[in-house]
């Protein structure tokens, strides 16, 4: 694992933890973990977790909208 892969992994794990906090919108969480482009963040998240950040959030909160 190179540095960029490690950094991405740390950022996405941090984002996954923060997605449980409904006070913040997904784009705000992308900024909090270091991504200035929420679309790029969502693509990386989907590649790593197999779902979008919003789908991940919904599955954790029991929401299915």
Image (cartoon, helix red, strand yellow):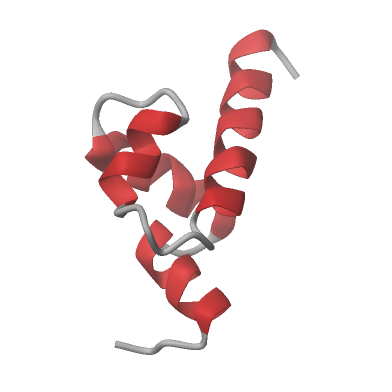
Question: In this image, 50 relative to 44: left or right?
Answer: right
Looking at this rendering, what residue extends furthest in the right direction? 1
Residues 13 and 48: in front is 13
- Position of 4 relative to 62 (above/below): above
Give me the residue at 53% from left, 63% from top: 20
Give me the residue at 51% from left, 79% from top: 61
Position of the C terminus by quadrant: bottom left
Q: Where is residue 59 in the image (x, y as percent from the top left)?
A: 52, 79
Residues 39 and 23: in front is 23
- Position of 1 relative to 62 (above/below): above
State the image quarter where residue 25 is shown: bottom left
Q: Position of residue 7 (x, y in %)?
A: 61, 20
State the image quarter where residue 58 is shown: bottom left
Give me the residue at 27% from left, 44% from top: 27
- Position of 11 relative to 2 (above/below): below
Q: Position of residue 2 (x, y in %)?
A: 70, 12
State the image quarter where residue 49 is shown: bottom right
Position of the N terminus by quadrant: top right
């Amino acid at each position: 694992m190179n540095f960029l892969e490690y950094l991405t992994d740390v950022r996405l794990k941090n984002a996954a933890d923060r997605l449980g906090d409904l006070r913040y919108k997904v784009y705000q969480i992308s900024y909090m973990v270091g991504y200035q482009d929420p679309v790029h963040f969502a693509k990386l998240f989907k590649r790593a977790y197999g779902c979008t950040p919003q789908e991940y959030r919904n599955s954790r909160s029991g929401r299915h909208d």
